Image: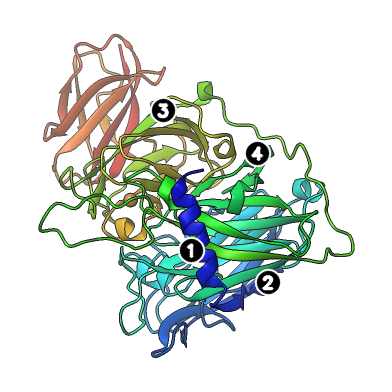
Amino acid sequence: MKPVYFTAALCCLVIQSAQSQTAIPVPDTLSGSSITLTMHQDSVQFFPGRFTQTLAFNQYSYLGPTLILNNGQNVSITVDNQIGDTTNVHWHGLHVSPRNDGGPHTMILNGMSWTPQFTVLDKASSFWYHPHFNGKTAEHAMRGAAGMIIVRDNEEAQLNLPRTYGVDDFPIIIQSSQLDSNNQFMPFGMQDSTLLVNGIPANNGYMAYLNVPAQVVRLRLLNAAGERTFNFGFIGNMPFKVIGSDGGLLSAPVSATRLRVSPGERYEILLDLTTLKGQSTYLVSYGSELPMGVQGGPTMPMSPGNPPMYSPLNGIDYNIFKITIGNPTANPVTSIPSALITVTPIPVAQSNITRTITMTSVDSLAMDGPFYFNQQLFDMDRIDYYIPINNTEIWELTNNSMVAHPFHIHNVQYYVLDRDGNLPPVYERGRKDVVLVKPNETVRFITKFETFTDTLVPYPFHCHILMHEEDGMMGQFLVVPRIAVGLNEVAALTKKLLLYPNPISTNEINIKLPEDNYAPLDIKIYDLTGKCVYVTKNTHQRTLGIIDLPAATYHIVASQDGKFYQTKFIKR
Ligand code: C2O
Ligand code: CU
Ligand code: CU
C-alpha cells in the first residue's frame, strides 16, 4: 500500500464525519412490453444557491428509471421529447437494428415521440440509455438524461446470485461533472470535480451512503462520466468478485481489489459482507494508480501558454460513497458461486478480416483533441465500412495520441483478444462493448455482425469520452446483405453494373453505370475465391484492360460516392 493511500483515506474519513449525508436513491423500475420514457427539463438544487438546470425522464428531476427487460421478450419503448430541443435516446450495448438503436441518425424533434420496437436478444447484464443526437450527446447526457437497463435471462436466473433489485442488487451510476459558478453543468469541462452517485452529490462536503444487508451484495457499476476513468476498490483493499462485464456474465467470478472502469463501461461485482454487520466501508477510486494519459490519472504537465485542464480529482485517491452494513434479509445469498456461465469467445481463425483503426490527434502533443480515427473526423454522410452480414471481424485499435480512449461500437458485443499482444485481464475476457485503449497501446477484439442489415442507416463506433465523440472521434458502418463478391470486401451492392461484351474473348471490357455521370470510379475485380485481382482508383475510364487476367469467371465492383455497382463476367 502506498503512503499516499493512507493520507487520502484518513483525511477523507475525518472530513466526512462532519458532512451532510444522503442515502443513495435507487431508481424505480419500468418493465413489460410497453414502456414510456418522457424526457423533460427540470432543475435540482444540488448545492446551496442556484438550482442546476437538468434533463431527466418521467418522475425524476435527474436521471431516469431503470428498465428491466427479459431476454426473448418484445418491447416497444415510446420516447417522448419534452426538452425544448432535438434529441434521441440510444440503448447502449443492446443488439437491435440500426433504426431502433437511437444512434446519431435518429432524430426526435421537441414535442414529438419515437417508438422503437424490438426483441431483447441480449444476455443478462447491465446496459444503459442516454441521448445520442449528433452534437448534443454530451450536453444532454451530462445534464442528466441517462438511466440503467437491466437484462435478465434464464441462464442467469439459474445461478444463486443476489437479484432483488434495491435490496441486495443495486444500480450504481457514477458521474463526475463540472459545474460553473452558477451551479450549471459544463458538459465539456475537464475540470470535473463534482461526483454524483445515482444523481446525488458525493464529495466536496457531501457524503453519499448505501445501506446494504450483511450478506452477498451485487453492485452494477456504470461509469456515466463524460471523460473520467475510475479505478475502483474498497478501503483496506477489501477483495471483491467481478462477475460480469458490459454485455454478460463472466465464466467465473474473478477476485479483485481494483477495477478500472472507463466512460460507458459497466461491471457487476459481488461483495461478501456476511460477517460485517454493523460495519462500513467505502467505494474508492484509486486515481493515483492510474497511468498518466488516462483521464483520472495524474494530469500531464502542460506546455506553457496552454490553459490548465486540471481537475482536483486527477491523480488522487478519493472516496465515492460509504457502504453501511445492516441486518441481513430473510433469505440471504451467503456464498458466491464458483462458476457462472459458459463464455465462448469467437475463435480467431473464424475472422474474415482485420480492420485497423488508429487514434491520433491534430498534433501529437494535443491533449484536448480533436482526435481522429484513421486521420478522419466523423462525417454523417460518409460510410466508413460496409460489413457483410455475419462477417466475423478482428478490429485492431492503435492509440497514437497522448490520451486514453474508451472505444465503443454499437450493435455488437465483442471479445478483447489482446492488449499489446498479451491476454487482457481476466475480468476483460467476457462480452464487452467499450474498451479503454491507452496511449501507445494496441488492443484487438473479435466480433460477429449478426441479425440486422440496413443499406441506409449505419451504426456508429466512437470514443465514449463525450467531448472527443462530439469533436468527431466517431465513424460509422453499414451491415449489408452478403453477395458473392470478395469475402473480405464490400458487399453493399445494390445496383447492377452494365458490362459488355460478356462473355469476352478480348483483353478489354467496357463498363457503364445505370445512370452514368462519368464521375470517377474506384474499381475492383475479384476471382471466385474472393481474391482481389485488379484495382484501379479514381478513374474516368470506362474501358479496362484485363490482359493479365487468366480465363475465368470474375466479379467486378465499381464504387462512386459510397454507392456500389457490381456484376459478374466471364473471360474466355
Ligand atoms: Cu453509449 Cu454510442 O454510445
Ligand atoms: Cu452505444
Ligand atoms: Cu477519446
Residue where numbered disc 2 is placed = 29
Residue where numbered disc 4 is placed = 254
Identify which amino acid the numbered label 4 is placed on: Val
Disc 1 versus disc 2: nearer the observer: 1
Viewer-closest of 546 and 105? 105
Q: Distance between the residues labelled 2 and 4?
A: 29 Å
Identify which amino acid the numbered label 1 is placed on: Cys
As drawn, which residue projects farthest toward the right?
Answer: 330
Residue where numbered disc 1 is placed = 11
Q: Is mark 1 on a helix, strand or loop?
A: helix
- Residue, x 50% and y 53% (percent of image)? 6
Residue where numbered disc 3 is placed = 353
Image location (x, y in percent) of residue 215: 79, 56
Ligand 1 has an atom within 8 Å of the beta carbon of the residue at disc 4: no
Quadrant where the image shows the C terminus? top left
Q: Earlier in the sequence, mark 3 or mark 2?
A: 2
Q: In this view, does 561 lie above or below 536?
A: below
Q: How many neighbours does mark 4 have within 10 angstroms: few (below 14), some (14-19), or many (20 or more)?
A: some
Q: Is residue 383 above or below residue 167?
A: above
Ligand 3 has an atom within 8 Å of the beta carbon of the residue at disc 1: no
Q: Is mark 3 on a helix, strand or loop?
A: strand
Q: What element carries label 2?
A: strand
Identify which amino acid the numbered label 3 is placed on: Ile
- Residue, x 37% and y 80% (percent of image)? 85
Q: Which of marks 1 and 2 is nearer the N terminus?
A: 1
Disc 3 versus disc 4: nearer the observer: 4
Q: How far apart are marks 3 and 4 (CA)?
A: 32 Å
